Each structure stands twice: as C-alpha cells, then as structure tokens.
Image: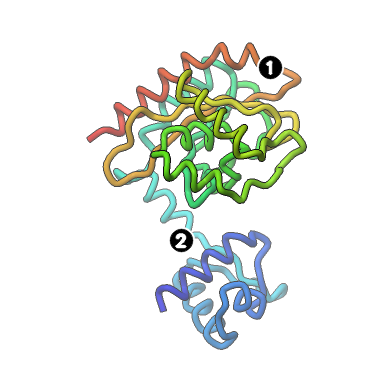
Amino acid sequence: MLGRGLRLLTVLAEHPAGLGVSAAARAAKLPVSSAHRILGRLVEERFATYDEEARRYALGSRVLELSRGFQRSPAGYSAAAAPMRRLGARTGLPVIAGILDDGEVLLVLSVQGTQHLQLRNAEGTRNPWHATSLGKALAAGLPEAERERLLAGPLPAVTPRTITDPALLRAELTLVRERGWAEVDEENEIGVRSIAVALPDAPEGTPPLALSLAATVILTDADQLRAHAPALRECAEEVAARMSP
C-alpha cells in the first residue's frame, strides 16, 4: 500500500494540473479500483486534493509540509540558504543548488538575485545533467565508473547548443576538475548561461551538492560571469562548513 501511494504521489508531482483517476492509475501502473481507493486516502490525509468539478486529483498541502520539514532536517539544505542569499545580493544573480539524481540534476534550493531574472530554477525542477553547469560540476567529481555510466547516456539535446557527444563531454569534465568549476552557455535554456561549483565535501548520508550562478546572455557576458567563480567557490566552502556535523 505504501509503495503504491508513493507511486501515485510521484505521478501527481509530474502532472501539476492534476489527473483523473483513470489517467493516474495508468501512469502509476495500478488497477483503477486500487488507485481510486489510495487517492481517496491521500485526500483524507491532505497529501492530495480532489477537484469535484474537474474530477482531477493533484498534490495536497501536506506534501509542502514534508518538503519544508526536509529542508530543516540535517539531511536538508537550509544551511545553504543564508550564504546563497548573500552571494545573490553580492552578484545580483540567482543562486541555485542542486544534486545528481538518477542521471538528472534535481534543484533543491534557489534564491533570487537583485536582477529578478525569470529562470526555470524552482525547487523540484529536474534537468539533464549534461546540459547544466550543476550537473557537470557534480559529474566531474564522481568516480570514473560512475562518470562513464552517465556518459553512456541518454544524452538528449535540450537546445541546439547542448553538447551530446560523450567524448566532448568527457574532455569537458576533465577541464572542470582542473579549474574547479563548470559552465554552460545556452545548453539548457536559450538565452541563459551559468557557472557551477561542487561543494568540497558532502555530509554523511547526503548526496553531493553543487551551487550555480545563472545569468542571461543579454545582461552578462561569459567573462563577466566567470569573474564570479571565486565568489561562488567561497560560497560553496561556507555552505560545506555549515553542513558539516
């Protein structure tokens, strides 16, 4: 029952506009009767909501409460918030934190800079690792076998500028390890470039974390963004110190 409920919650998270019971059951690979019963219980516990007019289920407020609880826990990332806010104020740029999760970068925390750029950086957003500076910074620090597994694909082209050749990506990850930071230029979102730095060490029991600074190509050229790499590294070191037991 627990596993089925979690599968349904995952399905609802992937469909923010909501789903009818039949569609949710198909996506979760469950019988409609089982999905209907479990969704009803999730609604009772406020993990899901039901719109009677639209006849659709969506995520409920308890999911947000769990998310906030996780952020405050030792395994969460609330310790990164203050240093990230200071960096955002100092540079004027959004600061984003992410982890690697099954070949994708999962964004776990973001703070706005003073420029208030409209970027796809909401917590919970997933992006292919190879199209993001966060993903490249994290992948560069993996053991060789794990890096090669990521390079074996899939490596979809998110934009026309996305690097999808494993050999080119392998060479880029070597460069990331040498200089200590990663960058992308319109590889994940047209009009946006970013740089990223992985935290020196991850606390036991938590996946490695990386921080990035993002900017629009119109307002910030590549050299201007790269000039913030030392400040980004300092922020990563402060976050690592705060997250250490």
Q: Quadrant of residue 49?
A: bottom right
Nearer the observer, 235 or 46: 235
Crowd around label 2: few <14 · some 14–19 · many ≥20 (10 Å): some
Return the residue at label 2: 62
Q: Quadrant of residue 21?
A: bottom right
Horizontal relation, residue 229 to residue 127: left or right:
left
Nearer the camera: disc 2 or disc 1: 1
Rendered view: 73 above or below 186: below
Residue in the picture at 66% in, 40% down: 164
Residue in the picture at 34% in, 44% down: 206
Counting from the top left corner in percent of width and height, residue 123 is at 53, 44
Which label sits on residue 220? 1
Label 1 is placed on what type of residue?
Thr
Residue in the picture at 60% in, 66% down: 58
Nearer the observer, 128 or 56: 128
Horizontal relation, residue 161 to residue 77: left or right:
right
Label 2 is placed on what type of residue?
Arg
